[in-house]
Image (cartoon, rainbow, N blue to C red):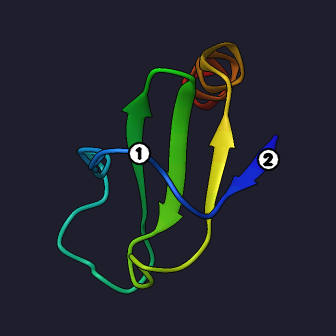
Amino acid sequence: MSICRTTTGSPVWFKSSYSGGNTTECVEAAFIPGGVLIRDSKRADGPRLQVSSAAWARFVAATWR
């Protein structure tokens, strides 16, 4: 896992369909060629985590148990 402070291009950010209308506690993700970026939706200009596609897939699979 790494912290990504700059990216090339403009990633398309999305929230989980389960996040609902509450805007106070949510993360956003964006698919990029090297994996997935993750950020705090309240701090769109803040730091971003970059994880591999494989790590993202394991995370999503673990949340569906």
Q: Mark 2–mark 1 contact, CB under 8 Å?
A: no
Gap in angstroms between the C-alphas marked 2 and 1: 16 Å
- Tell me the quadrant of the picture where the N terminus can be found: top right
| Front of the two marks 2 and 1 | 1
Q: Position of residue 17 (x, y in %)?
A: 23, 45
Secondary element type, mark 2: strand
Q: Earlier in the sequence, mark 2 or mark 1?
A: 2
Q: Is residue 59 above or below residue 26?
A: above
Callout count: 2
Q: Nearer the viewer, residue 2 or 54?
A: 2
The residue pinned by badge 2 equals 2
Is 40 displayed left or right of 63 in the figure? left
Q: Quadrant of residue 48?
A: bottom right
Q: Amino acid at mark 2?
A: Ser
Q: Residue at x 39, y 76 (%)?
A: 44
- Tell me the quadrant of the picture where the C terminus can be found: top right
Return the mark for residue 8. 1
Return the mark for residue 54. none
Q: Amino acid at mark 1?
A: Thr
Is 14 displayed left or right of 8 in the figure? left
Q: Is residue 63 above or below residue 65?
A: below
Q: Residue at x 41, y 45 (%)?
A: 8
Q: Position of residue 21 (x, y in %)?
A: 17, 73
Q: Position of residue 52 (x, y in %)?
A: 67, 24
Secondary element type, mark 1: loop
